[in-house]
Image: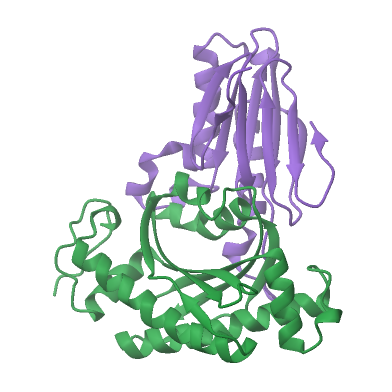
Chain colours: A purple, B green
Amino acid sequence: MSEPIRVGMSEIVVAKAPNVLVTLGLGSCVAVCIYDFFLKVGGMAHIMLPDSSLSSPNAVTNRGKFADTAVPDLFNMLLQKGAAKERLVVKIAGGAQMFSFNGLNDQIQIGARNVAAVEKALAELGLTITNRSVGGNVGRSVFMDLETGSVRIKMLNSPEIIL
Amino acid sequence: MIEDLSPLQLDALREVGNIGAGHAATVLSQLINKKVSMTVPQVNVLPLAEACNFVGGPEQPMVGVYLRIFGGAPSKMLYLFPEEKALFMAGLLINDPEKCRNLLGELEVSALKEIGNILTGAYVYAFSNFTGIHMISSVPALAFDMVGAILNTVLADLGEIGDYAVIIQTQLTACDESVDGHFFLVPDPGSLVTILDALGVKEGCQNRSGLECPKS
């Protein structure tokens, strides 16, 4: 089997079987995995922030960073590869709160805000999330197998999960 | 601006790391009662997409102690320690190594946060004196997890301003290698100009990534 394809922070990658898409050490970021089981085509977006409209205009050049821009981009990239909306399976992982300060801090809640923004962006496209592993205070590594569409989640102190 | 820092500016930032980490090393040495050596600080200007790939790879388990720095030049401060070194340090601090066996225990977490607090105090004090910028640190927070997850959480909000992070990194090691840690000072993008200005090397920043260079 070929080398897994790394999806770095703020990147969107679409590929075909037999590839594996991988993102290692996901904290507050969210990995959105969308898969067309018929074509065996899938994509992963590694989202850092919830909302592009809150950021300086210069930062928005990289649309892969934000939930509200990355999710539609990933969707469109899949459609261009011939994927059909009704066959798409959506799984998300990440959005942890790695650090807990005593007291409220907006920045620290970024994981939860990312998850909420991803849910909203998916809902606007009419996509439903079938499986998820989000929140908590654990880092996750995400492996998306494009042969089967299964998404494997590795954590440091807990057993593996297959979504 | 971040990706266009001149060699002189990088040198100035390295000096900040040197002075800050130098003070922190002295304090660490007193704390553990051992000689501590430090590396020459590295100033890395990294695309955010790659920022999680150093310090032994993203899946390396590490203890991270994280503090925010407020004041004239808001920044983030992060310490990364390998698991066994963190436990060893916690044991030294409470003067009972037998008690520190579980990294997620309340006592260990509290001791490690306190170490972060003490080291940051020294770093920030030196930094503040050197630049004349007033700074105070937040309470510490701790995570024990994959280093990639720790770094991407700490760096995520930099994405609101640009695609790069400036990371001033120093490694401290005790003479017998019982303690080994990485220090990171990550100035918020807006703070870089303030720091460079205080150091007298504001000139030469080219305004490409949308950061404002205040007109003097």
Can residue B139 be seen here? no
Give the answer, above or below, for where B73 lies relative to A93: below
Q: Which residue is drawn at the image coordinates 63% and 34% (left, top)? A: A32
Q: Is residue A65 left or right of residue B10?
A: right
Q: Is residue B89 left or right of residue B5?
A: right
Measuring 45% from the left and 87% from the top, which residue is drawn there? Answer: B23
Q: Is residue B160 left or right of residue B199?
A: right
Q: Quick one: B55 or A59, which is closer to the camera?
A: B55
Q: Residue furthest front?
A: B176
- In this rendering, the answer to whether B6 lies above or below A154 is below
**Considering the image in quadrants, where does the N terminus of chain A appear?**
top right
Q: Position of residue B118 (x, y in %)?
A: 58, 86
* B42 relative to A50, above or below: below
Q: From the top left corner, tell me how far across and down residue A124 is, in percent.
A: 61, 31
Q: Residue at x 47, y 37 (%)?
A: A64
Q: Residue at x 47, y 79 (%)?
A: B70
Give x and y (percent) for residue A80: 49, 13
Quarter of the image with the C terminus of chain A is top right
